[in-house]
Every structure is written in structure tokens, then in C-alpha cells.
Amino acid sequence: VGETVATEFTSCDFEAIEVAHPVPSLRTERSTAYSPRRFRVVMVDGDLGDAHDVPFEYKERGIYAAGVAPSRTGDFTLHLYLDDDPCGCEPDSLQKGRSPDALSTTPCATLAVRAVCPEGLVGTADRGCGCPVGFEARGATC
């Protein structure tokens, strides 16, 4: 909690062969002239079920880095989509057009994330981070 962790993923074609060019993340006239495909990274809160998009950037040679920055402690799951189709699925279980609202039933590869408090802080009842009992906050430390 309180920091961004780069989580890398690699773009592959439909036969899982790595590709060495970026897939556009935004659909513009210029980007769709080269490739109409786009990635989407979604993080789902394991307790609340809330889902939100995670920013990512192209690094090099088909490698992307998603900036995972949970705002509260707990368990989360990252899901990767290519044109709103879930990635990491076995060909026979690929569910075209699956809505992000149905992520919990997607039989595809996901990444579990556990957000914890920075060293010196403890979890609070509202899933935030605070000082241990008997200590006072002084800026960002106790």
C-alpha cells in the first residue's frame, strides 16, 4: 500500500508466440491502422469485488509493465484482456466478449496480489495503514 509495483506481462499472438512490437493501448486512427488490438489490465478487489483498470506501458520487445498500486490492504486479482477477451485461456475455454463484471468466473490465467502495509505500519479496520497501538504518526512514520 502506498507504492506502485511494476508487474510485467508479454504480448503473444493467438498461438502463444511472442511478438516484438507494441499493441496499442488506445484506439486512435493512427494506432488502428497498424493494429486494431488493445490490452486492458483490470485489478479486482477480492473482498469487495470492485474492479478498476490499471495503467500500463510498453517497455520493449513485446514486454509491458502494469503499475499495480492498491490503495488499501487485502487480496486482489489481476486480469489481462486483449480487446475485451480474457488472455491466458486455454483455446477451448476462451469466452469471447466476457464482460469485466463476470471476472470471478473466468477460467483464465490471473495473478494474485496481496497488498500489505509498509514496514513500521499496521493494518487498520478500514483496510488502510496506521501506527501500532501506543505510537503517534509523525508525517509518514510512527
Image: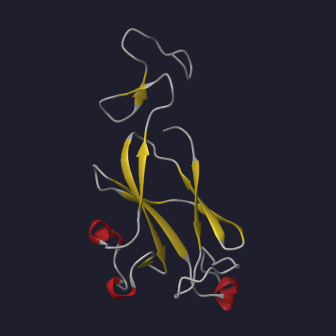
Left or right: residue 27 versus residue 80 is right
Residue at 48%, 38% in the rendered image: 1
Q: Is residue 112 above or below residue 118?
A: below
Residue at 68%, 76% in the rendered image: 22
Left or right: residue 64 versus residue 134 is right
Q: Position of residue 2 (x, y in %)?
A: 52, 37
Splitting the image into 4 quarters, where does residue 63 fall? Answer: bottom right
Q: Position of residue 65 (x, y in %)?
A: 61, 61
Please tell me which residue lies in front, 32 or 94: 94
Q: Position of residue 80 (x, y in %)?
A: 47, 69
* Residue lying furthest right: 60
Splitting the image into 4 quarters, where does residue 28 fall? Answer: bottom right
Residue at 51%, 59% in the rendered image: 54
Q: Is residue 125 above or below residue 90?
A: above
Residue at 39%, 87% in the rendered image: 91
Please tell me which residue lies in front, 84 or 116: 116
Give the number of marks: 0
Q: Position of residue 48 (x, y in %)?
A: 28, 51
